[in-house]
Image (cartoon, grey):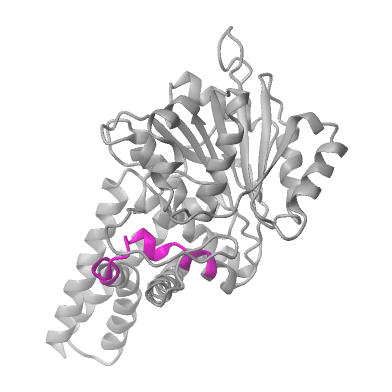
Amino acid sequence: MDTALWIASGIVTASMLAWTWLALSRGWFWRTDQRLEGRHEEAVGAGPWPSVAVVVPARNEAQVIPRSLSTLLNQDYPGPLHIFLVDDVSEDGTAEVAREVARVEGSGDGLTVVQGEPLPPGWTGKVWALHQGVRAARDFEAEYLWFTDADIAHSSGVLRALVSKAVDCRLDMVSVMAQLRASSPWERVLIPAFVFFFTKIYPFRWVNDHRRPTAAAAGGCMLVRGQALEDRGGFEEIKGSVIDDCSLARLLRGGDGGGRLWLGLSHDVTSLRAYNGLGVVWTMVRRSAYSQLNYSALNLVGTVVGMLMLYMAPPLATVAGITALVTGQALASSMLLVSAGVGSWAVMSAIYLPMLRWHRVSVMLSPVLPATAMLYTLMTIDSAWRTLRGQGGGWKGRTYETRTPGQHLDS
């Protein structure tokens, strides 16, 4: 028993060292200080504001389009602005609802509904919709393209802030992680952790450091310099991508690392989508989780082992150590096991607090992160299982063929 306790102590000590390293050396990923500021009255100096084409891919979004489209039509933006909504073969009257919203808002001339064409072989649905939107916007000759999802609402000053950030910092892409709903019990448990894991994979500070190769974006809100996208070959270069936002970010960063990106948070960009049950989040994650691992079984095994060591070892070690102490077994190794378990769990919980506060969720949920992490691990395993069975990633009811490792990179 003493030997087993010492081995367990070694494992959880490694976990504590790993969490300490993550907290101090991975771009301060857990902080929420990379934020898009609000209104910018003098964003582009004395010159005219650049033209912007808004591209909205929409497939069966009739329920949310009235709210989201209204926020786009009412942007307080002084430059030329036009919205191109791509109706991707919707079956619920999305196009008609969008036209009616524009009519009621008195902005019929500011909206073009693009009737989506059938999905060609080799393309994923959302990327194809975005490509069609860009193609339709060519005559508008916009300097910037604003890609936003049909279930995202924006405060009236968001476009000003996006454009001013892009112009002032000479950026090729400005992207904002939308404020996801965290109201229901499952949302409070799962949603802050989802963003926490994303920032751990793609530290925002590293994305925003143009000397680093890290590239990522949040697909709900991406402002892209049109010439930069054209120079990199457009959406045809990433046509088979399931994780379209990060693939677009890597495309714009370029192999030479010359593309300039910025990724941050904002309470002014909000998701209208509800994630009221575990099943809703589960479906969202398994759509692309295995793609994130490049469809690699080896990466999957490494991820599962890593998640177990990082997230489950601390609470299990704490319980095992306390049990050993209560039963009077091996005092020295039991004390070490409890100390390392509590210490690792404490570091993990502490760096999770800013994300909970950002989502306005009780900090009392911080110690629950290990259980939440295990749910996401199971979602990832399910994603791999479904992909291997030919039921992998998709978008709005479409399922795409299984890809082999190395065919395209979404990590």
With 52 as the anchor, is 4 left or right in this view?
left
Q: Quadrant of residue 268?
A: top right
Residue occupying image coordinates x 51% and y 54%: 120
- Residue 219 shows in this picture: yes
State whether the magenta stretch is mostly helix, strand or loop. Answer: helix
Closest to the observer, 218 or 119:
119
- Quadrant location, the N terminus: bottom left
Please tell me which residue is depicted at 45% across the width and 25% down the height of the picture. 227
x, y (%) of residue 174? 48, 33
User: In this picture, is 22 found above or below 386?
Assistant: above
Residue 148: image x %, image y %? 59, 42
Q: Which residues are magenta?
A: 283-301
Residue 332 visible (yes or no): no
Decide if residue 265 is on the left or right side of residue 277.
left
- Image quarter of residue 10: bottom left
338 sits left or right of 101 in the view: left
- Residue 384 is situated, as x and y percent measured from the top left of the image, at 38, 72
| Residue 287 magenta | yes
